[in-house]
């Protein structure tokens, strides 16, 4: 894999060559991390295959709810209804949480389209990594 990549034009950036971003160091959670924090940590291991930033920082995760029985409900979206990973990304989120967070009794991932995703939902770190700042 080359250390140079072209900026993806599907997110509204001009086609320019720039250094390929390095993967961030794995975040370590404290031993007393909350269940919610463990779930977010698991979600941050899921990447959109076309954008080298995790889906949490891209802003695809709208809400993470943990019920009293430790069941998990994730409300998420995709960059567009025609997203090529629409069938695989939500199940990947569900599997990552299920596999990495033993305390979660069940995991449901719901995809919604309202409000629609926009670049404004991206974190500052994601925008910086993608050369948008």
Image: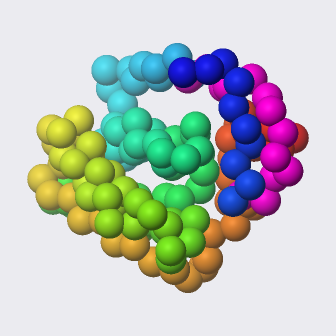
Q: Is residue 62 visible?
A: no
Residue 19 magenta: yes
What secondary structure is the stretch in magenta mostly built from?
loop
**Of 53 and 31, the residue lying toward us:** 53
- Position of 60 compared to 36: left or right? right
Q: Where is residue 56 in the image (x, y as percent from the top left)?
A: 52, 48
Q: Where is residue 39 in the image (x, y as percent from the top left)?
A: 34, 44
Q: What stretch is highlighted in magenta?
A: 11-23
Q: Where is residue 17 in the image (x, y as percent from the top left)?
A: 80, 33
- Position of 101 compared to 2: left or right? left
Q: Which residue is drawn at 62% across and 20% down?
A: 2
- In the picture, the quarter occupied by the N terminus is top right
Q: Which residue is drawn at 27% across and 43% down?
A: 96
Q: Where is residue 120 in the image (x, y as percent from the top left)?
A: 75, 61
**Colour setup of the view:** rainbow
**Residue 98 vertical position relative to residue 71 in the rendered view, above or below:** above
Residue 122 magenta: no
**Of 28 and 18, the residue lying toward us:** 18
Q: Which residue is drawn at 79% across and 29% down?
A: 18
- In the picture, the quarter occupied by the C terminus is top right
- Position of 99 compared to 110: left or right? left
Task: Report which quarter residue 12 is drawn in.
Answer: bottom right
**Residue 77 vertical position relative to residue 59 in the rendered view, above or below:** below
């Amino acid at each position: 894999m080359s250390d140079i990549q072209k900026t993806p034009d599907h997110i509204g950036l001009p086609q320019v060559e720039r250094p390929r971003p390095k993967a961030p160091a794995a975040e370590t959670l404290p031993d007393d991390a909350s269940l919610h924090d463990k779930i977010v940590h698991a979600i941050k291991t899921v990447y959109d295959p076309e954008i080298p930033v995790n889906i949490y920082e891209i802003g695809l995760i709208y809400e993470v709810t943990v019920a009293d029985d430790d069941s998990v409900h994730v409300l998420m979206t995709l960059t567009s209804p025609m997203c090529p990973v629409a069938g695989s990304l939500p199940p990947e989120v569900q599997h990552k949480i299920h596999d990495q967070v033993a305390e979660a009794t069940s995991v449901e991932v719901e995809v919604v389209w309202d409000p629609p995703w926009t670049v404004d939902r991206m974190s500052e770190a994601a925008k910086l990594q993608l050369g948008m700042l």
